[in-house]
Amino acid sequence: MTMTIVPSLHFLLPQNSKPFQIPNFILKTHYAPFNFRPQFSRETNTPPSSTDRGLIFQEKVQYLENLKVNPQKAFQVNPNLRSTPLSTVKSVEQCLSSMGIHRSAMGRILDMLPELLNRDPATDLYPTLDFLLNDVGIPYPDVHKSISRCPRLLICSVEEQLKPTLKFLMKLGFTGSNSLTCQNTVLLVSSVEGTLVPKIEFLKSLGLLESEVNCMVVRSPALLTYSVEKNLKPKVEYFLNEMNGNVSELNRFPQYFSFSLEGRIKPRHKVLVENRVKLPLHLMLKGDDGVFYETLINTRLRKLDGR
């Protein structure tokens, strides 16, 4: 079988690397005319002699250091890496490069998740790429952004973790124009029952309808990444008890939860109380301090003018 290389994708390969065939499912949606077929060529590795093992191991250590991966940490977290052929590690680098991940970002990802270093691209990594492209609908040029923001996508089971979570998120309303983007695919690594459902239930416990809660999280996906006990609950209590707010305001401005309680919400609320001024949440919290004080002054002037 001959291997075809598409010139327009050469930029995905590391410099000075051998041609690496991009599997068919990477291109079948966006580059269908090329009709790629997956083909992986692995070297036949015979057991090295005892005199060569030290040199081979040192070469692997040097390779990891060049990738900006801490070898000591990598071998500790992933003991099997010691006996993994260097060709396998290099195939992982080529795989990540074919996803558009630059070498500088690759080192950070592999240092964070050393278990990736001896994964088989064909069975362990490319299925995740296939899922992001064809199930989630992430454009090919944006795939590397999803992975860079959430490298754990590469170690999560597509069938057991990613697909069930995507199905749950789609039921919430992450479909069509509100589909997941590279900005929020981090949600896919969350446990549905252990992480997502408790946050949905907490918001519903405030008296919001299920449809209202769904709309809130679609408009502000970060809500599903916040801790109930450390973020959502204390901010709700302060809003209701100290600011005398109404839950309907949170429904209109769910971004409230993205602001620091101690760093922004409390200080700005204190200023408003001292000046006997009340502002909608979005005017109170959005913008820098200059914008906030300008809005405050204009509001006070309108009150003095009786407007």
Image: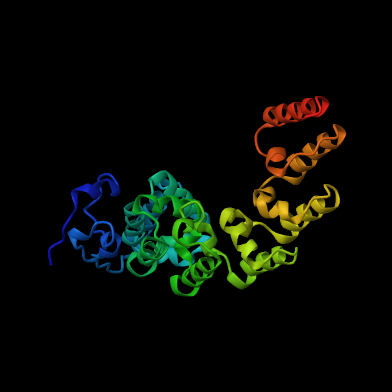
The quarter of the picture where the N terminus appears is bottom left
Question: Is residue 76 toward the left or the right of residue 234 in the image?
Answer: left
Numbered circles on residues, count: 0
Give me the residue at 72% from left, 55% from top.
248
Locate residue 260, reporting x and y percent. Answer: 71, 45
Q: Is residue 307 above or below residue 281?
A: above
Q: Nearer the viewer, residue 185 or 299?
A: 299
Q: Quadrant of residue 146?
A: bottom left
Q: Position of residue 164 (x, y in %)?
A: 50, 73
Q: Is residue 89 visible?
A: yes
Which residue occupies the foreground of this view, 180 or 22?
Answer: 180
In the rendering, at what x and y percent does residue 263 appear?
74, 40
The residue furthest left is 2
Q: Position of residue 53 (x, y in %)?
A: 36, 61
**Colour scheme employed for the rendering of this structure:** rainbow
| Residue name at image x 44 percent, y 46 percent | 105
Classify the position of the C terminus by image quarter.
top right
